[in-house]
Image: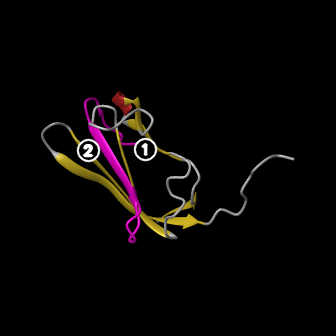
Amino acid sequence: MLSGFVKGDSIELEITANIDITGWEIRAEFFDLTGNSVKLATANVTGGSDDQIIIDDAANGIFTIKVSAGSTTNFDDKAFIEIERTDGTNKLTIYQDDIEMSKEQITWTSVT
């Protein structure tokens, strides 16, 4: 189980696949059982962009999944992540896990 995530905060997960991911189309979804969902993809997938999933180092299999602030505000305390890839021929789920989501404790409106 992944933990340490706060509802509503920005999330960045750096993933290392340890293989060359050149040309991969990568999709990820954060979701809970009440219907909340955030779908993300690399720029080479329709609707995806480098603001969602960026390939940091294709030769070494490093990419970063980025969830924007506010996207998970209404999520349950228990959520899930699934990451899949396709190389144009084969689709493969490369990761699935539960996510423990904590409630935000501090809401900043100013620093004074």
* Percent of width and height locating residue 85: 26, 44
* Percent of width and height locating residue 23: 25, 30
* Percent of width and height locating residue 73: 54, 60
Q: What segment is highlighted magenta in the picture?
A: 15-37
Q: Residue furthest front?
A: 109
- Crowding at mark 1 (Cα within 10 Å: few <14, some 14-19, many 20+): some
Residue labelled with disc 2: 85
* Residue under the point 57% across and 56% down: 8
Marks 1, 2: nearer the viewer? 2
The vertical placement of 23 against 99, above or below, is: above
Disc 2 marks a residue whose amino acid type is Arg
Horizontally, is 3 left or right of 34 in the view? right
Q: Is residue 33 magenta?
A: yes
* Percent of width and height locating residue 61: 36, 36
Residue labelled with disc 1: 15
Horizontally, is 20 left or right of 53 in the view? left
Which is nearer the eye, 20 or 37?
Answer: 37
* Residue under the point 54% across and 65% down: 101
Disc 1 marks a residue whose amino acid type is Ile
Q: Circle 2 — which element?
A: strand
Quarter of the figure with residue 103: bottom right
> Tag 2 or tag 1, which sits nearer the N-term?
1
Q: Circle 1 — which element?
A: strand
* Residue under the point 28% across and 31% down: 44
Which is nearer the eye, 90 or 43?
Answer: 43
**Mark 1 and mark 2: Cα distance apart in space:** 13 Å
Quarter of the figure with residue 17: top left
- Crowding at mark 2 (Cα within 10 Å: few <14, some 14-19, many 20+): some
* Residue under the point 41% across and 63% down: 36
Q: How many marks?
A: 2
Color style of the picture: secondary structure
